[in-house]
Image: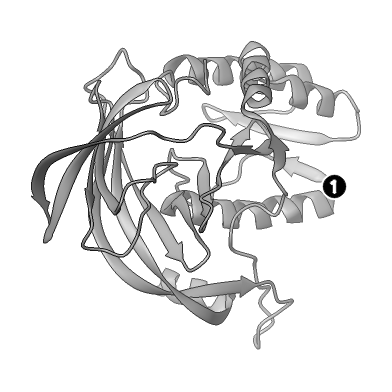
Amino acid sequence: MKQLHLLLLLFSISIFGQGTRIAYEYEFVPNIKQKDSIKKEVVFLDIRKDGSKFYSQKQFVADSLRDQYFKQMRASGTINTNFRGTNPGLVKYSVTKSYPDYNVVLKMPINRNNYAVKNEKAIVWKIDPETKKIDKFTAQKATTEFGGRQWTAWFTQELPFQDGPYKFSGLPGLILEMQDATGTQAYKFLGIKKFDDVEIKESANDANGRTMVIIGGSNDKPIDVTEAKFIQLWKEYKNDPVKDMRQTLSQGNVKMKLNMNGKDISDPNEIIRAMEKSQKESIKNDNNPLELTLFP
C-alpha cells in the first residue's frame, strides 16, 4: 500500500473524457517447439468515440517508468542498462484503429526504434450461425484467415461496438474470444467497464520537492513504414541484432555498463558479444509471432 501511495503522489492527472475498456487474457506460446509453455498477459482494448487502442497493461506502465529513467541517464551523459523497473511483460506492441474508416496501425519496436505499420489488407470474415454464451453475452461464430493463421472468433451484437483485440474488427459486433487453428494464440474475454480517459503530464516538482514523472509510453514518435519495409527491417535485425548498438559504442563518447549473470561488463567489445548472444537466443526462442507473415 505504501508503494501505491507514493506512485499516486508522483502523477498530475487531468480527466477529460470517458471510454469503454474491454479486458482480455491473451494466451500464447512464444516457442512453437514448446507448446506446453503457455504465457498469459492481460491486454486492454480502450474504445473511445473516434477510435480504439489495444495494448498491454504491463508494457504501458513499464514503458513510462523506463522512459523517465533513460531520460535522466541521457541528461547525465551515461547509459546504464541495469534499470530495474516493473515487469514489462511480453506484449511489446500496440494497435490503434480510427473510426469510422477503421484505419488500423500496428506500433511495434524493433531494437531501439518504434515503427508504425498500417494494415494493408482488409480482414474478410465468414459468419457462422453457431452461437454460445460468453459471460452474460450471446456470441456468434466467425472465421477468417489473417497473418498466416486460421482464426475462429466469437462476437456479440449485444454491445454497441464493432471492434476486437489486436487488428481484428469488421464483424457486426464486439469480438469476445479468438483462437487460431494451432491453439497457440488466443484471446479470452475478462470483463468490460467504463473508464475516465486521463492525461498524465510531467511537472517539475510536487509540494514536497519530489520530481514528477511522465507516464504514457515512449515519447519517441514511431517511424511510418509499409508492411514490406517492416519485413525488410525485421530480417535485417534478425541477421544482426546489435548493429545499432555497435554503431553507438563505436562513437567513443558513450559509457555503458551491462550486468550479465551478476557480472558487470564495461568493455565495449565484450558488451557487444554478450548482447549479440542474448539477442540471437531470444529471437530463436520467440519464433511463434501472432502475424507469421509480418515476421518471416
**Residue at image point 40% right, 55% down:** 45
Residue 224 point in image, percent of width and height: 71, 39
Of the pair 6 and 170, the residue shown nearer to us: 170
The answer to whether residue 56 shows anywhere in this view is yes
Using the image, determine if residue 228 lies above or below residue 141.
above
The answer to whether residue 1 shows anywhere in this view is no
What sort of colour scheme is used for the picture?
one colour
Quarter-wise, where is residue 26 in the image? top left
Of the pair 89 and 105, the residue shown nearer to us: 105
Question: From the viewer's perspective, is 186 left or right of 49?
Answer: left
Residue 218 point in image, percent of width and height: 65, 52
Q: Secondary structure at mark 1?
A: loop
**Residue at image point 74% right, 76% down:** 204
Question: From the viewer's perspective, is 215 left or right of 253?
Answer: left
Which quadrant would the N terminus be assigned to in this image? bottom left
Of the pair 77 and 106, the residue shown nearer to us: 106
Location of mark 1 (residue): 77
